Amino acid sequence: MATHAETLDHEHYHPPGLQHQFEDMKQQEESVSIGMWLFLAQEIMFFGGLFTVYLVFRSRFPMAFAAGSNHLDAFWGGLNTLVLIVSSLTMALTVYYAQKGNRNMQVILIVLTMFFGAVFLGVKAIEYTDKYNSGLVPVTGLNKRAVGGEAHASTNFVLPFETRASATAAEGGHGDAPYVNPKGDFVWTDTSLISNALKEQAADPEGSYLTTAERYGYFSNGNIDANKFRDKVRIFFWIYFVMTGLHALHMVVGLGLMAWLGWKAWLGTYGPDYYMPVEMSGLYWHFVDIVWIFLFPLLYLLGRHFIHA
Amino acid sequence: MFPDQASTFAWHVDALYFYLILVSVVFSIPIVAAIVFFGLRYREKEKYATPEEMHGSIMLETTWSIIPFIVSMTIFLGGAIVYYNQFRMPDDGMDVYVVGKQWMWKIQHATGQREINELHVPVGRRVKLTMTTEDVLHDFFVPAFRTKMDVVPGRYTYLWFEATKPGKYHLFCAEYCGLNHSGMGGYIYVMEQRDFDNWLSGNVSGQTPVEQGKDLFENKLGCASCHAGGPQQRGAKLEGIYGHEVKLVGGQTVLADDAYIRESILNPSAQIVEGFQPIMPTFKGQVTEEQLVSLVAYIKSLSGITATTTGGGTGSTAANSAASGNTIDSANTMAPRKAERGRTGQEGSNPNTPGTGTEPTNSNR
Amino acid sequence: MQNVDALDAAYNDRPTKNYLNNGYTLKSWLLTKDHKRIAIMYLVSVSVFFLMGGLYAATIRLELLTPASDLLESGTYNKVFTQHGILMIFFFLIPSIPAVLGNFLLPIMIGAKDLALPRINLLSLYLYWVGGALTLWALTQGGVDTGWTFYTPYSTSFSNTFVMAVGLGIFINGFSSILTGLNFIVTVHTMRAPGMTWFRLPLFVWAQYATSLIMVLGTPVVAITILLVAIERVARVGIFDPSIGGDPILFQHLFWFYSHPAVYIMVLPGMGVVSELISNFSRKKIFGYEFIAFSSIAIAVFGFLVWGHHMFVSGQSIYAGLVFSFLTMVVAIPSAIKMFNWSATLYKGSISFDTPMLYGLGFMGLFLIGGLTGLFLGSMGLVVHLTDTYFVVAHFHYVMVGGQVIAYLGGIHYWWPKITGKMYSEFWGKVSAMLIFVGFNLTFFPQFILGYLGMPRRYASYPAEMQVLNIFSTAGASVLGIGLLMPVIYLAHSLFYGKNAGPNPWMLPGLEWRTASPPPTENFETTPVVTWEAYEFGEESGLDLEGARRRESVTTV
């Protein structure tokens, strides 16, 4: 609660950055802080809708989710997690140096933070391209078209090292069929997870290896229907793209924010008297980081638990 | 002010309604009284007067929190009991299957009898509806029974009732479903058991073919929703077309004769009238040959031709009647008709070769 | 003595410098940071949307004069009711009191110079305009026919209308709403004048605070839901499509999770206004201040728990339905508490029946009916019959129009002198208030009966036996329409020919009445220091009642 007993006195010292509607810096700082926390709260509700969707479909079709998750490369996901955590460190240090008034360190750390942010986005680009090349983008027409049985590995964008998807493709994990995709559809042919579950179910009639939704969701006339299974895996990838895409969009906004912040820091705007914009940008950056911390295990680590249990 | 009470739980729902009206009146009285009496008694006598201060009263606040809470709990409980009874499905219901689709209700009895936009049920029997939809959400609503339930694509929903009074009751679609949502309705016919058995076995009242056709056109098959909707209707105009040339999309013209009408019902997308969209669904499998005859007769009557053409010939549909409880006992023939132009090899249709006067075959059900 | 006379004569003079004449350029308005100017721009904008939504409503009532669908084609009628709903809900009702009255009054009522984040406030306005413009553009291109509720799979896979464009318009508008709410919460926390403790705040501020909580936490959920629908339409793949395993009911859960709390956004601010009206025009401290304040918060919190009561017949489980029905009963109690407290405030007051008070009392009567019929719809046994019929239509119009719109009009009339510095014609004010009350009841009460009879909603044609009640309803609508148009005329007239209002035309204790009418840009000449309780009409208020009586006697001579 703020109590500001002075009357308006236009003569007294105005700290830099104090806006006209506030009596003093303390009121301004309190206001922007509450404002930013409220903004983050509504961002949580925004992503919360997507997490709810994830929850609903994962509990209905766990096997399809596991299968899809297994095709995400946990190496890249893990790297991204590390990158973001380090970027949060550099961001926190930026705030520290802003409070200290150390202009050079601020700018260096902001640049570092942006660098890590860019690395994150670069890795996402690699991952998305990989999906494009493997026919895992859930929208028809947005996958690499390949007539007549090319190998999985793309000829357009060759990675200097193997990713999990291309590795499993090489070892025939993504079905033994070569990559044929004349219309750029979403392709998925591997129903081995279901066959395994059925075998386990047969061996253990008491146990429950398929959910109710899966019992009719993957089958037609009592047989495994590869197209229906593909549709459920497609839902996983749709959620993957929407969630990570929205997150990446927030990341891009974050980079823009950092660019502006870096420019202002270079001008020497921030110091012990006035550093709230740095702290508030830090809050935003940490939030984007935390969303990823939740996304990573839910999307990337699902498969390994399920399959290797 | 009230719809008929025609089901076993209609009066439960009405009783709950009256209870709620009573509660509303009882709670409104003190408030309205306060507004009126206090407003009059304490109207300002002196400008800018300052009345005596009054502090709040915890006792009053508690009272008028607890009492409404208790009353609302009684409303909740009453509602819960009525609802629970209404939606716990009985084991011994007479099964009826309902499929909603834009913009009609397709209903099938367990005995195979099919209906469109109508449901005949016997009085005093529990009827359980298993429902779904082919496309978007709809809702099966019968005000006289005080019940409704949405139909959802991809799953089944259920509804049951026991009708108590013979009569004809409205059926409405109560979940917005697009263009013809308002027209997607019909009637529930509750009949005495004997009448219901008669109906099931196909003995309908003696109507002339034109009357029967009119009934099918306006009520049972839903034709009127697109073909009698006024100047901007979605279906081609049928009045006065019989015996005249009709212009089709693509420039051809065709004579609107019996065969044309029959084809348009069974295979509507083959010949689209110019200026209209190819949106008419096929009724193949839903109309019997006898019904086709009545429809043709009715449509002819819209052009002022009242003589119907019936003739001898055996009903070739006898074989099909085994699949449903409906028997076709009268003959069905078509008057000899001219060759249809430009159409050959239509599946399931009746390709005419001039002069053969072949019997139409109704190979679908 | 002479000095006093001179002062008295000049008492009502319009202040030479106020927020309206502080800059006349377009730029000074479009780039303003002044919450009062932003409020005026919102006032004009929401009025335009209200007019358009009203025209759609008139079209609906005209069509429903006859049982057949003869005025409009079904397809057009579907667009008309959809667009009526969208414009009224998203572009009129949700912004109305918060963005117009809240923006103008909140800072003044707490003794602040402006909102905490004025540039965010301006951004809110811009987002509202962009969202509104996009939606209006889509309407000119052919509109949308999904119903304002956008149920899937119709909206994702079947409708051939501009779902995506309108959806994006609503999405953008949602952020306007979120930022306004965010701004209000921050302002109430940090910008209160010295001595303005939480429990001295006017109840209008408490109501805005509770509303803002809902705006900030609920709106993002509908934003993501609409985004998912738009993506599903464009990408032809999604999560609501049952043919690939998706779930149309999931949409309903996500949609109503926001849209139920949204209806509290569409009534809590109105209740805040009514608390002001009842108390001030009885010249008596509101009865049960803390109870009314906390009931607003309780409604906001419990409002997030009852969304399933829109889905009783959707195929949801019986047990979920029972839980939602129970909680719906619980959420009704705080509203009942308010009604009783307002009634008790009238007891032993000194009640004047100025136009704003007429609206306040009208709200009480109409919200009474609206709220009670909500209980009908919360009771499971009854709602099965009543849901998706005209009973629901009548219920929500009673609470939204009979509630919020009446309160909005009451607030506009109450604070008009403060906002514009002018008084309107009290005679025409009373006449239109009564016309609105009568017209409204005649329009919507028959719809309760129609609903019980079984007339479903969103129907262009209906069985012939329901025509008489529909004719009553349309007749009422014409009276209501006239009643609603009249304020536009006499309020506009007052801007040019109205009497100067002076700082405190009714001699009321609120902080907003302690500054000039219209207020200066900085709101107060000096920061107020609050030493009196809320709704303090006695000596502690520091009001110069003697002076007021003296001026009255002079003018009546």
Image (spheres, coloured by chain):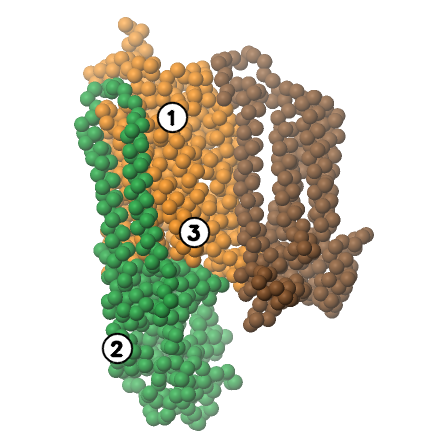
Chain colours: A brown, B green, C orange
What's the CA distance linking mark 1 and mark 3? Answer: 38 Å
Residue drawn at point x = 25 percent, y = 66 percent = B164
Q: Which mark is residue C320?
A: 3
Inspect the image, locate mark 1, and give the three-letter code of the amino acid beneath it: Pro
What's the CA distance linking mark 2 and mark 1? Answer: 71 Å
Q: Give the percent coordinates (x, y) of residue B180.
A: 39, 63
Q: Which element type, helix, strand or loop, lies under badge 1?
A: loop
Residue drawn at point x = 28 percent, y = 15 percent = C545
Q: Give the percent coordinates (x, y) of residue C148.
A: 43, 50
Residue drawn at point x = 32 percent, y = 64 percent = B161
- Residue occupied by mark 2: B194
- Residue occupied by mark 1: C202
Q: Which element type, helix, strand or loop, lies under badge 2?
A: helix
> In the picture, which quadrant includes the C terminus of chain B?
bottom left
Q: Residue A68's quadrant in the figure? A: bottom right
Inspect the image, locate mark 2, and give the three-letter code of the amino acid beneath it: Arg
